[in-house]
Amino acid sequence: MNIFLLAILFSTLAITKLYLFFAFVYYKKYGVVPSYLLNLSYNLSYSSIYYYSKLQLGFMKTQNTITTYVKSVPFLNNLLTYVKPESNLDIYTYTNVNDDLTICNKHNREKNINHKIILHYNPDIEKIKYIESLKLEQTDYKFIMTEITIDDKKFVVHFTTDKYNYLIEHNKLDKHFIYFFLKTYYNDVVKDLEIENYNIKIIDHNVNIVEFDNSKTLFINKTDYEIL
């Protein structure tokens, strides 16, 4: 509907510009613009804005009336819900790091969020269907700080950013994942370091300080986490 209204407005403005062009040509030739051309251009400009507003209000009123009626009829309301495009569908993509690690990216188009699901295996078609049937929600918390120490070098990392979120329910952040994570997001920092041995210090959402090394796994739950 808005496209139709804009088409009317632009058409009217085009006609107005055409009249102004003839008025300009007339002025260049005779040194004066006839009053009837000026009045016509003013009237066209005013009328285009006035009728555009009237048509827009009329379309909005009609649309609201139809929508209200459809929602009041169960059959039509169900039909409207059925044919409505689902803009919040999740899109899943899989990155196979190796046979023991696959990163599943669950992208929500409506919220533009990437949930990173850590799979400690290479999934087949059936397992992929099962994965995509799960809710796999993000946690109710975020860490205040995560610091990794490798060869006496300390640096801060982030498991959640505006581009990705690895704090997803049931994720297991073990040494295989940490290696992939650092190489993917912090390669400039760790390119000259041996990542096999590291120590992680976390200040969590409750301001608790937790430390563990590469022999442990950080297991993510919905409302809390565990060191396994």
Image (spheres, helix red, strand yellow):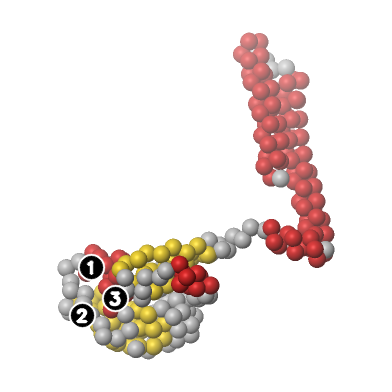
The percent coordinates of residue 163 (x first, y second) are 42, 64
**Secondary structure type for disc 2:** loop
- The type of residue carrying mark 3 is His
**Marks 1 and 3: CB-CB under 8 Å?**
no
Q: Which residue lies at the image location 16% right of the left edge and 68% below the top edge? A: 192
**Secondary structure type for disc 3:** helix
- The type of residue carrying mark 2 is Asn
The percent coordinates of residue 181 (x first, y second) are 31, 70
Q: Is residue 12 above or below residue 107?
A: above
**Secondary structure type for disc 1:** helix
Quadrant of the drawing holding the C terminus: bottom left
Circle 3 Cα neighbour tier, 10 Å, few/some/many (<14 / 14–19 / ≥20)? some
Q: Quick one: label 1 or label 3, which is nearer the N terminus?
A: 3
Question: Which residue occupies the foreground of this view, 199 or 209?
Answer: 199
**Marks 3 and 2: CB-CB under 8 Å?**
no
Q: Is residue 1 above or below residue 88?
A: above
Please tell me in which quadrant of the rendered image residue 10 appears. top right
Give the Cα distance between marks 3 and 2: 11 Å
In the image, is 60 to the left or to the right of 203?
right
- Badge number at residue 176: 3
The percent coordinates of residue 59 (x first, y second) are 77, 48
- Badge number at residue 197: 2
